[in-house]
Amino acid sequence: MSLVITVTFIDTPSKGYYKQELAEKKMFLEKELTLIKYLYVGAGGFVGSILRYAVAGVVSSSGLASSFPLGTFTVNMAGCFLMGFGGGLMEDRQIFSPEVRMFLFIGMLGSFTTFSTFGYESFVLARDGQWLTTLANITLQVFTGLLAVWGGFIASRLL
């Protein structure tokens, strides 16, 4: 009777292989995290655009709006106030995670406010010769927007 011992040598990959594998996993994870960021922004944009449509629609159908674009004005001023309020909370209390900031500020408020609509409505008013309404729209949107941001920021500090 003889005893046979078999030794198998397993060829282990070199350290360079492991570094490459780790680098590939890191790249995959970074791409995955980037996709998640886009999803936060997109979800916020979805919510903000629906809110914009609803709020502007309610205000415009209330009978208060005539030739002045009151729905857009209301949405922009509310958005400016919320941006100031949230910005104040973010600065003073740092209560929002990066994901919440992406959802709220870039996504939701970014799609809720309607600067491009403001520009178009101002253009149409000017094109139609409604110069006083054009001037009032531009002046009120810009200055009241700045005041609303300031008011929201101050309100956040009073909490």
Image: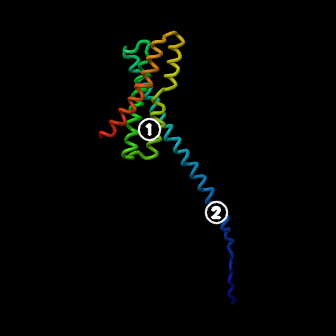
Could you say which is closer to the camera, residue 126 or residue 143?
143
Quarter where residue 53 is shown: top left
Q: Is residue 81 left or right of residue 29?
A: left
Q: Compared with residue 146, is residue 28 higher up or lower down, i.e. above or below? A: below
Give how far apart the Cα atoms at labels 2 and 1 are.
Answer: 38 Å
Residue at figure coordinates x 45%, y 42% from the top left: 101
Residue at figure coordinates x 41%, y 12% from the top left: 66
Which amino acid type corresponds to the residue marked 2 in the rendered image?
Lys
Q: Is residue 21 left or right of residue 81?
A: right
Q: Is residue 32 left or right of residue 156?
A: right
Quarter of the image with the C terminus is top left
Q: Regarding mark 2 in the picture, which secondary structure is present there?
A: helix
Name the residue tied to disc 1: 104
Label 2 packing within 10 angstroms: few (<14), some (14-19), many (20+)? few
Percent across and percent down for residue 148 are 38, 29
Percent across and percent down for residue 46 are 48, 33
Q: Residue furthest left?
A: 159
- The first of marks 2 and 1 along the sequence is 2
Q: Regarding mark 1 in the picture, which secondary structure is present there?
A: helix
Q: Compared with residue 85, is residue 132 higher up or lower down, i.e. above or below? A: above
Percent across and percent down for residue 59 are 39, 20
Name the residue tied to disc 2: 19
Label 1 packing within 10 angstroms: few (<14), some (14-19), many (20+)? many
Residue at figure coordinates x 33%, y 40% from the top left: 157
